[in-house]
């Protein structure tokens, strides 16, 4: 070995010793010893994964969030059904008015007649959003379109009626 090779080897030994000392002093295991590497691996393996309690907490939080979103969505869905029913009733009323003008009649047509006379599209729904038939009433030059609403019972507060009934003031 030449003098230069010995100098290089001495520098490597000093560097390795200083690195080893630096890591040990800082509480970091030495990367140069197999024993230290084994200890570090065992320490990390003991900390891997999550506990059942942590998983249950996450599942509970997700269930609460899902439940609140579902509750809000259901309320919005019910409002949308009612708004759709009111809009459909207005459209049916206009179609009946046009049919009466074109046919010079004051009677109420059926949904089938409105579709046959092209006042309604053939793909329009013949029922309200709750699956009940629309009720038409043509009296005193007024056209009423009515649905029994979500409870499917006539005369209850949730009924849809176009035009809306005006409450007569008591005298």
Image: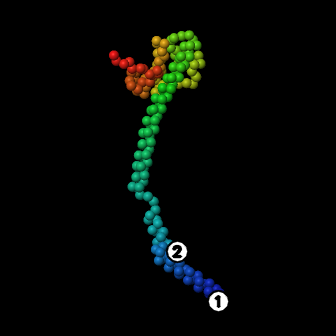
Toward the viewer: 66 or 93? 93
- Determine whether, in the image, residue 150 is placed left or right of residue 19: left
Circle 2 residues within 10 Å: few <14, some 14–19, many ≥20 = some
Res 35 seen here:
no
Residue 52: name its quadrant: bottom left
The residue wearing badge 2 is 31
Q: Position of residue 96 (x, y in %)?
A: 53, 17
Circles 2, 1 touching at the beta carbon (< 8 Å): no
Q: Quadrant of the C terminus?
A: top left
Q: Residue at x 51, y 19 (%)?
A: 93
Extreme residue toward the left, this view: 171
* Mark sitting on residue 158: none
Q: Secondary structure at mark 1?
A: helix
Toward the viewer: 141 or 150? 141
Q: Secondary structure at mark 2?
A: loop
**In the picture shown, does residue 66 fall above or below 156?**
below
Q: Position of residue 141 (x, y in %)?
A: 48, 13
Residue 116: name its quadrant: top right
Extreme residue toward the front, this view: 171
The residue wearing badge 1 is 3
- Determine whether, in the image, residue 121 is placed left or right of residue 139: right
Q: Residue at x 54, y 10 (%)?
A: 105
Q: Position of residue 55 (x, y in %)?
A: 42, 54
Q: Residue at x 65, y 87 (%)?
A: 4
Q: Position of residue 112 (x, y in %)?
A: 54, 17
Q: Residue at x 53, y 24 (%)?
A: 125
The colour scheme used to paint the residues is rainbow
Circle 1 residues within 10 Å: few <14, some 14–19, many ≥20 = few
Going from N to C along the chain, the mark reached first, 2 or 1, is 1
């Amino acid at each position: 070995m030449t003098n230069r090779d010995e100098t290089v080897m001495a520098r490597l030994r000093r560097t390795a010793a200083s690195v080893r000392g630096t890591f040990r002093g800082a509480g970091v295991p030495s990367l140069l010893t197999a024993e230290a590497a084994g200890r570090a691996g065992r320490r990390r393996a003991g900390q891997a994964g999550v506990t059942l309690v942590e998983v249950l907490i996450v599942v509970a939080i997700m269930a609460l969030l899902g439940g609140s979103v579902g509750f809000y969505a259901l309320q919005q869905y019910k409002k949308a059904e009612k708004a759709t029913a009111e809009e459909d009733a207005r459209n049916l009323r206009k179609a009946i008015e046009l049919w009466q003008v074109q046919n010079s009649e004051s009677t109420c047509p059926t949904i089938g007649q409105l579709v046959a006379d092209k006042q309604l599209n053939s793909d329009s729904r013949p029922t309200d959003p709750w699956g009940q038939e629309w009720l038409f009433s043509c009296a005193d030059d007024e056209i009423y379109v009515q649905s029994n609403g979500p409870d499917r019972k006539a005369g209850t507060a949730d009924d849809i009626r176009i035009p809306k009934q005006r409450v007569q003031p008591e005298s």
